[in-house]
Amino acid sequence: MTELNTYNHLAVEKKWQTFWETNKTFSVDNKKSEKTFYALDMFPFPSGAGLHVGHPEGYTATDIICRKKRMQGYKVLHPMGWDAFGLPAENFAIKTGVHPKKSTNKNIQNFTRQIKSLGFSYDWDREFSTTDEDYYTFTQDLFLKLYDKNLLYEDDKPLNWCASCKVVCANEEVEQELHERCGNVVTKKALKQWMFKITDYAERLLQDLDAPNVIVLHGLGGNGDSGWGADIRKFFIQNNIKCNSPTFPNSNNPQYSEWKIFFEKNVLDSITPQTIIFGHSLGGGFLQKYLSEENLNVKFSELILVAPTIGDCGISEISNFFTKKFNYHKISKSVENIFIYAGGKDPYITTKEFNFLTEKLSAQLIFNDNQEHFWGDWNLEKIPEILEKCKKILASTIDWPNKIKAMQRNWIGKSTGAEIDFMLENSDTKITVYTTRPDTLFGATYFVLSPEHPLVKDITTNEKQGEISTYQLECSRKSELERTELNKNKTGVFTGSYVINPVNNKKIPVWIADYVMMGYGTGAIMSVPAHDDRDKEFAEKYNLPITEVVVDDKLQNSGFLNELSVKEAKEKMIIFLEEKKLGKKTVNYKLRDWIFTRQRYWGEPIPLVFTENGKCLALDNSQLPLILPESANYEPSESGESPLAKITEWVNVSGYITDENKVIICAESEIPKNKIFQKFTRETSTMPNWAGSSWYWLRYMDPKNSDEAWSKDAEQQWGPVDLYVGGAEHAVLHLLYARFWHKAFYDLGLVSTKEPFKKLVNQGLILSYAYQRKTGGLIPTDEVEEKNSEFFEISTGEKLEKIVAKMSKSLKNVVNPDDIVEAYGADTLRMYEMFMGPFKQNKAWDTTALEGMNKFLMKIWRLFSEKEISESCPSKELIKLTHQTVKKVSDDIDNFKFNTAISQMMIWVNAFQKLDTIPKISGGKFVRLLSPFAPHLAEELWQKFSPEDKTISFKSWPSYKEELLVEDEVTYAVQVNGKLRGDFSISKTATKEECIAAAKKLEKVAKFIFEAEENGGQIRKEIFVPGKIVGFVVK
RNA sequence: GCCGAGAUGGCGAAAUUGGUAGACGCGCGAGACUCAAAAUCUCGUUUCCUUCGGGAAGUGUGGGUUCGAUUCCCACUCUCGGCACCA
């Protein structure tokens, strides 16, 4: 092979990486731009093991999309950084004695080298680590903002304790009773901890998972199919959001009663808690009147009143809409948020009236001096404030995989039911239960308290005291795991007391049993063994009575509920309970507050101090960053005390309290005159590693800002993240915490969107092959030999099965990206990982297929270096192929179908390699299509096309012409009775008759029709699908 | 048990308003080039039958709708992932 044709991937890749780095090709500034795109990879924890081949999978996908967006003229924010606080770094430090700061920095260096070797187009000027003082000063600052917002409290209830890591963990970090970090059993331990009130946000975290549906109500003389109302509908439907803009009857001469009937028939049912309603002019006026007089079943999300009529405005046609004053209080209670868009030049409604309405509805007013009535056939472009609003709605609507949304819904665990009060027999003690089936109250035949319920000691009769205490002790000794594992065999003890069923005054026995948990509902249940499996099992074991109250969705033995359906009975029972003050409708969540503090060294110190009286105060902002002390003994303790607690000179400090009730630490000599010098002790716990990752996407927008975590301008410019790519393992950890903090930031006015991540995509895992014995044991790869596509264990000769398994050191099937880059190059690794299979699916690593990809890239190299690039015009066929390829690759990138995009590029190469010279116009398009996938090779090739360009990165993305995609001649398949019998080619302009005639002429078709006719059939039907199929039905 | 995703050649997989199932790649087979090998190129490669023209079957299973179903509907089996005594 000649020197000319050798592609030296090591040299070429290094050359371009250096070029991009020294020229800061991918750096972006924050100057305002119309077309921006923010793509984010879940930033990695820089582990000592280095990069896994799974990392580049997601990184390559975002890189492809970013490189394409840049070529399409977008300003692209594509950052990378390090999530470097946390247990593994610290555990490594304890094992080796190397300070976590040192090992972390070393790991970051290694990760940086590895990631840079793959040629991703990150803006490295925005890089940071969560462990940087410049970064965690703002983690602490934000913590204090949330503390001031009263979202934190101290609690000393028993919580999850990992004895192996000697650390408390959040509920989200416990998987099947095991600590997700180390796999050891988690036990309960009572420790004082800071808790985040994530439960305050439960409803919003749940609701905002669902997309809104938008309804637009037009005004007087308007309709749903013209003007900006129709534009809004188009806008949302194009973005996959349901939108309805109905046309009201007789809109030139409207009657309220007629509109009301129409609204109730066509719109009302579609109103959900996620609904957003735009009402223009009379449409807004109508809705005010409707909400003022009628009750909706649900409180909807947003009401956007655009130049709303508010009363008699002198237009005779609508006088019947406003016979009496609105009940503004009732209107504002029907909806979460109201916005009013008003214009200073509105001929019908005065500014004074708008202000009046805004105040009455506690709405937000968006006022534009120059707007008139937002009317007519104007399109959305002409009403920028409404367009802005639509974009905001879209930005707050998340496009996430069902799986992740389902997991979050499940974790939040909302249920609706009732709390019902039961009275203890012969006593005025009241015990409340929570149930989702209030309809079955007549079937409650016994009553169970959790063993930890505070009332147990009060209600236990003297003779049962001993038995109960023994049982309680037994339960407290069981670990959570045992309690769950033994769930097949329920246990419990009778307390000796009875409660009275409030609907039938029957006395029912009170038991305690550990299948009822203190943490959910009220820690007490009414048992309906006929209609609950767990209650039934328990009742059967202890011979408790069972009363059936529902048969085939009909209530029976249930007094006033008899004959009702379950749904009706639930409603009626709740009304009954509320009227008699025996209970109330209740919503319950499984979500618990977020246990935030950790008893470890390697985390952000918490900027809180305690006075000598034990009062907790926040540090003044000027005290940040509160630096993690350098020379700590970072061994954790058995007691759950943080290693920081041992550094007495750090813990014990003095200073004074400011007028804002914040603490400043200083020497006595520095105290202002009117302040008292006093002692404080610091909070010694640290934050969990989730803290740093709960706001990092915002820091990338403005990473060098030393005054604030991010500026408003930067946030408005880039937020929210357009595309977020990472593994599904963070479904209820990072992704829930991040949404929670972001919503709190939204409430604080720090961000302009309700959700942080617009589109979320999870890549599949990259797995490896492993070899399994019949008995199930896995054999390391190097102890296996292959004979005729079968696998045998070398030592025993036993036949093994090839299976797919996670990469692991012990199986010796780990692939190191460094080795691949060295041997085949970054482009090969990138292309291979994209070609392995569908992006979202798990895939097994196959080295021979990787080699195949390398061959493909070398084929491309030879195509453009061995053949002359000519000015010749490609054939019609090849022009068509090139345009098809442009379309396919463009569409596939947008849809994360990288595997088929690459297939199409292979088809292109296979066709063009048959030529003697490569037409420059086609080749240039191809190289640009290739560049997001294999940027090094593409840069190198681009020099052959356009040596005056420094880089291909900003060349325009190729376009295609729709009309060139179809041929002049099309091939029709011909079917007889649904079976393929032949095909023919014909001009694409041929008529149906011409095609059918041509089909009948085909020998085989004629034969089958003839045979059918021989058997007494005839042509019953002729089918014609333009451009595709001609069919005959012969019977 | 509940929720989510999925099942197509020897293997990874394509195929969306229902219209030629298996694109593209890996592997395998044959050939060309070569002293030879590697690399490269060309051809073939769902299964079964075949008189070599072709024919039949075929997308987890069983039904249904249709001229026509991988695609839509009903019932079921299995695999993977998550949650789980949540009243």
Image (cartoon, rainbow, N blue to C red):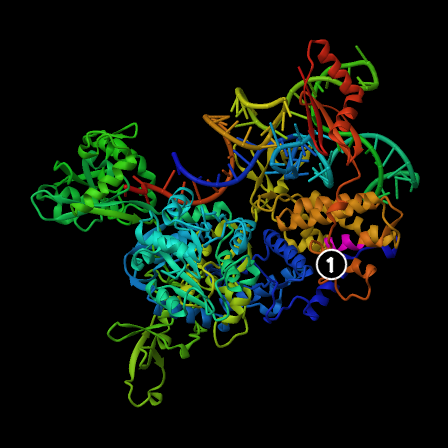
Q: Quadrant of residue A107?
A: bottom right
Give the x, y percent position of residue B70. 60, 30
Q: Is residue A225 magenta?
A: no
Give the residues drawn in magenta, as a range. A924-930
Task: Say if A781 sits above or below B9 in the image.
Answer: below
| Quarter occupied by the C terminus of chain A | top right
- Give the mark count: 1
Task: Identify the residue at horizontal 55%, vertical 61% (top origin).
Answer: A46
Name the one closer to the observer, A781 or A222. A222
Q: Residue furthest top?
A: A1015
Chain letter for mark 1: A
Label 1: how many Cα within 10 Å (few below 14, some 14–19, many 20+): many
Task: Identify the residue at horizontal 52%, vertical 67% (top origin).
Answer: A716
Left or right, A698 with reference to A8: left
Circle 1: residue type: His
Task: Say if A85 sits above or below A837 in the image.
Answer: below
Name the one closer to the observer, A412 or A160. A412
Task: Say if A435 sits above or below A322 in the image.
Answer: above
Name the one closer to the observer, A375 or A874. A375
Give the x, y percent position of residue A910. 80, 43
